[in-house]
Image (tube, rainbow, N blue to C red):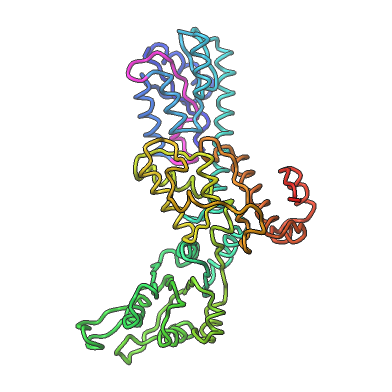
Amino acid sequence: MADPSRILIVDDDPIVAESLGEFLSNEGYATATACDGVEAMDVLNHAKSNGSAGTAEGFSLVVTDLNMPRCDGMQLIRDVRKTHPSVAVIVVTGFGKIESAVEAIKQGAVDYLTKPVVDDELRIAVNKAIQQHVLLAENQSLKNQLAERFGMGNIIGADYRMQKVYDLIEAVAESKTTVLIEGESGTGKSMVAHAIHTRSPRRAGPFITFSCGAIPETLLESELFGHVKGAFTGADQDKPGKCLAANGGTLFIDEINSATPMLQLKLLRVLQEKKFEPVGSHQTVSVDVRFVLATNQTLAQLVKDGQFREDLYYRINVVNIKLPPLRDRIADIPLLVEAFLTKYAKETGKDRSITEDALVALGRSRWPGNVRELENAIERAVVLSKRPVIGVEDLPESVRSTKGPSSPADNDGDTATNAAIPALEGGWNPTPLTQAMETPERLILEAALQANNWNRQETARQLDINRTTLYKKIKHFKLDEPR
């Protein structure tokens, strides 16, 4: 939070600016001045870039005139609200009109005073504005905490299944334990692996990714363990593998279900002894590596079918993190859409929102490609849309043509596919903290209840809350069991 005593005075009349500054300094505030809106924004931006939360570099309040050259006070209010949302603004002007006062308040000003300013009025207005700044800064801090909880790194999701994933990541990160991540393609397995690494004591070490499914079988062992010169045709020099490159850090092996039998055998030894021999060499290499593995198929079934080593399976299945498919957590779609809209607005310069109908259509889609497919759909819509609001017509045909199930029985076992999508006029915008909390919570509750056929005891158990709390939330959100 910025120092709550720092105030920027903006007025093109230096005498007025000096007078206000002297009064506020006597009241115990630190002040700075700017002659118009352009200079004021330069001062605010410079303070923000050179300071950090909790330093005296930032400002709590802007006291501004309205009629100024280059950039007037009304535009300054809009600019401050957009780029420095926790900074409060008071208007002090010699051209007081009801219309301009109303407009200033609408744009985000805390108060509107006319010159000559009465000391007591200014004192009261400044105190109120400083209090608002503190509340806004605290609200932003809470939203940042919410984002950190519901968006671990690049992982986004408020669904109770995702919260359990977050808990597992936090619980296992500090250890050296091998982790197996299971989930369909596009569910974010690599992001989970990276989150484990960045929260571990090995965060300063390398994070190396190796995908068994992306490399020809003949090169798998060489790529993972390296080879020596002359080991095979084309091996004209020694080459270290991914395993050695990850020494001191984390090795993420994706699509372990595609590993050849020989690679599975070698990997079993590395996991047990932290030793291996490069292809064509008899020299043993020791490494200090933390292994995180992922699969898009059920390894237990592959073991039963004789396609995966049972001993390796039990060796890597120490901590198992299961990522739910997107169709099982559609309550997270608004959060994901908002994140992708923000991401591609920065990349393309196109600031886009989304209509209620488009959001409903996204919620009805099956998403076989999961979060990756949803992101591609939003990127496409942002790039191709010519209007500031994305509609159903801007979505891929596969999404437009999807008709959601009319009842939970039509889901063929897919939980939460029929969960309600909120009516979000003008697009999802979780700015108020209460809205950011309540909207996902309602959707999560409804999805969980539908998934359990409205069995409240089982729903309460899965959500890790008592039944009384669940009943209160059902009543609060007015969730009625379908008849």
> Would you say 182 lies left or right of 68 here?
right
Residue sitting at 38 percent across and 28 percent down? Answer: 41
Please tell me in which quadrant of the rendered image residue 129 appears.
top right
In the displayed structure, 397 sits above or below 295; it is above
Stretch of the chain drawn in magenta: 52-71
Total tally of numbered discs in the picture: 0
Residue 365 against residue 477 in the figure, above or below: below
- Residue 270 visible to an observer of this rendering: yes
Which one is nearer the viewer's eye here, 369 or 194? Answer: 369
Residue nearer the viewer, 373 or 148: 373
In the picture, residue 435 is in which quadrant?
top right
Asked whether residue 315 is drawn in magenta, I would say no
Where's residue 200, x and y in %?
A: 49, 65
Q: Position of residue 251 (x, y in %)?
A: 42, 72
Q: Looking at the magenta stretch, what is its main secondary structure?
A: loop
Q: Extreme right residue here?
A: 468
Would residue 198 be visible to someone looking at this image?
Answer: no
Say which quarter of the image contains residue 478: top right
| Residue 55 inside the magenta-drawn segment | yes
Q: Position of residue 339 (x, y in %)?
A: 47, 47
Q: Is residue 322 above or below residue 424?
A: below
Residue positioned 40% across, 16% down in the render? 11
Taking the spot 26% from the left edge, 85% from the top edge, the residue there is 228
Q: Is residue 208 left or right of residue 111?
A: left
The residue positioned farthest toward the bottom in the image shown? 282
Q: Is 483 or 198 nearer to us in this picture?
A: 483
Pinpoint residue 72: horizontal percent, then vertical percent: 39, 18
